[in-house]
Amino acid sequence: MRVVSCNSFGPVTDLTIEDRPSTPVGPGQVRIAVTAAGVNFVDALFVQGLYQIKPPLPFVPGGEVAGTVAEVGEGVTTHAVGDRVFASTGLGGFATEVVVPARRAWHTPDTLTDAQAATFVQSYGTAWFALHHRARAQAGEWLLVLGAGGGVGLAAVDVGRAMGLHVIAGASSADKRAAAVAHGAEEVIDTIADDVKTRAKELSGGGVHLVYDPVGGALAEAGLRALRDDGQLLVIGFAGGEIPKLPANQILLRNRRVTGVDWGGWVGGHPAENEQLLADVLLAIAAGELHPVEPTAYRLDDVATALQHQIDRKVTGKTVLVP
């Protein structure tokens, strides 16, 4: 099999493509012939050694894959060779094949392409967990999504619209704002040219109830100040590169709340609840309530370009590697 190997932490251009022996399939496992591997900002962090967790070297990046079952292990009755499936791998996804426990290989709905199936889990899992579980958002509330043109932001726009929220999309380019509108945003803010706080208050009639922030940096404080009394800032990540230092008086004086959203960390301690979360997302997709974007595809050999585009925030929607 061919894999993308990270042999040392550093620039994404240092990644190599290697041929390795196939991993044996053990009892309760399946081999997936990968047709699409999702590319996420966190993959670039892993490669550069900038993520909170540093895996032992060398390692194969990539946390999401889709494809077909090529082999089933002893005792597996839920899958058969040829089944279309998707899986979260944690690491190891940037390869032509992966071996995973059968219980972690979900059957791909007919409503999703392989590329969509390989890219929706992290984004939609985070958005669903944030808005349903952490924020307990209610229909009719105003939601400001920052970084709304990226994969994580577009998923939040989509989930928010499906929940009956009034969604304002903040993004840095016209293409990204247009993508957010196509996914259900009612209003948009140019996060480069506009005063985010002022514009969000104008559009929402005095302040938003929720801010979904995967960007961080200066935008986080602007989002905090855009909240109304008892509003909630959902901290998703720091794609902008800078971890913000928020003014505590702005939290105190308006009874605002700052809520951390670490879906990946929550999954480890709540496997049964996460299976239900994913089942709920799949039901909403099957019912036509959610609409994962069709990603832009890169060849496996172009992994460095795909990751650099994530780092430079040039991506609208999602991207996949296609072995």
Image (cartoon, rainbow, N blue to C red):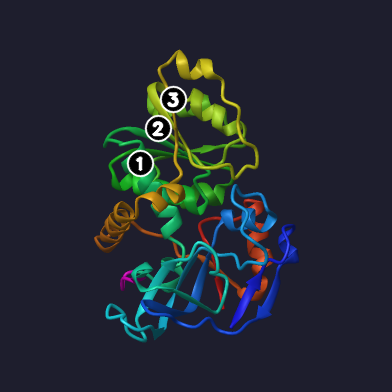
Which label is found at residue 210? 2
Q: How far apart are marks 3 and 1 (CA)?
A: 16 Å
Residue 52, position as x, y percentages in the image: 60, 47
Residue at image mark 3:
227
Q: How far apart are marks 1 and 2 (CA)?
A: 9 Å
Mark 2 secondary-structure assignment: strand
Residue 50 at least partly seen? yes
* Near-viewer residue (102 or 246): 102
* Near-viewer residue (194 or 318): 318
- Under mark 1, the amino acid is Leu
- Residue at x 66% of width, y 49% of height: 50
Residue 228, position as x, y percentages in the image: 40, 22
User: What type of secondary structure mainly makes up the magenta span?
Assistant: loop
- Residue at x 42% of width, y 16% of height: 254
Residue 161, position as x, y percentages in the image: 33, 45
Which stretch appears magenta? 106-111
Left or right: where does residue 290 sit relative to residue 148?
Answer: left
Relative to 201, say whether 125 is above or below.
below
Give yes or no for residue 82 being in the magenta stretch.
Answer: no
Q: Distance between the residues labelled 2 and 3?
A: 7 Å
Residue at image mark 1:
131
Mark 1 secondary-structure assignment: helix
Residue 181 at least partly seen? no
Which label is found at residue 81? none
The tag earlier along the polypeptide, 2 or 3, is 2
The reply to whether discs 2 and 3 touch (Cβ–Cβ < 8 Å) is yes
The quarter of the picture where residue 201 lies is top left
Give yes or no for residue 108 being in the magenta stretch.
Answer: yes
Mark 3 secondary-structure assignment: strand
The reply to whether discs 3 and 1 touch (Cβ–Cβ < 8 Å) is no
- Residue at x 65% of width, y 53% of height: 311
Residue 195, position as x, y percentages in the image: 57, 28
